[in-house]
Amino acid sequence: MSVRRCQREVDSAEFVEWIAFSHIDGLTAEMDDLRCGLVTAATYNVHRDTKKARKPFGPVDVVPWLNRTEPEEDASPVLLADKTAQSNLICAALFGKVANG
């Protein structure tokens, strides 16, 4: 379905319902990447040289943007004196860019 057709046929109430459903059911792009990573990792594992790569691959190994590192136990929050700098730091961490200011 094209975007124009979707805009003609789907009203905002139905669109919000689909968004809510996707959050409940896990129909997100990240989940799609994870599902593809499972298949890719299984394929790699079937064909890997177990002498060179003893540890089997997982989905995060083949989809690098899913690789999330756990925060360090002793990590303390970064608090800046300047409010704008603090906001820019948060925006950069969350969205990869600095807010317009």
Image: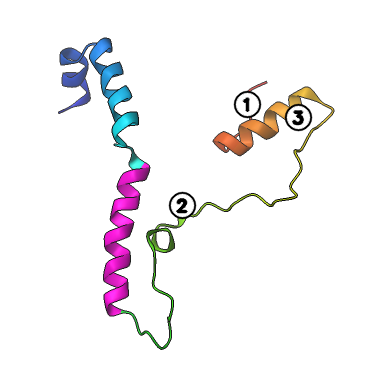
Q: Residue at x 27, y 18 (%)?
A: 17
Q: Residue at x 76, y 38 (%)?
A: 78
Residue stretch rendered in magenta on the structure: 30-47
Q: Residue tagged by mark 1?
A: 99
Q: Residue tagged by mark 2?
A: 65
Q: Position of residue 7 (x, y in %)?
A: 22, 16
Q: Position of residue 94 (x, y in %)?
A: 57, 35
Q: Residue furthest front?
A: 73
Image vertical order of residue 95 relative to residue 71, above or below? above
Earlier sequence position, callout 1 versus callout 3: 3
Report the quarter where the C terminus lies: top right
Identified by mark 3, the residue type is Ala
Circle number at residue 85:
3
Where, by quadrant of the figure, is residue 76 drawn?
A: top right
Q: Position of residue 81 (x, y in %)?
A: 84, 28
Q: Is residue 79 magenta?
A: no
Identified by mark 2, the residue type is Trp
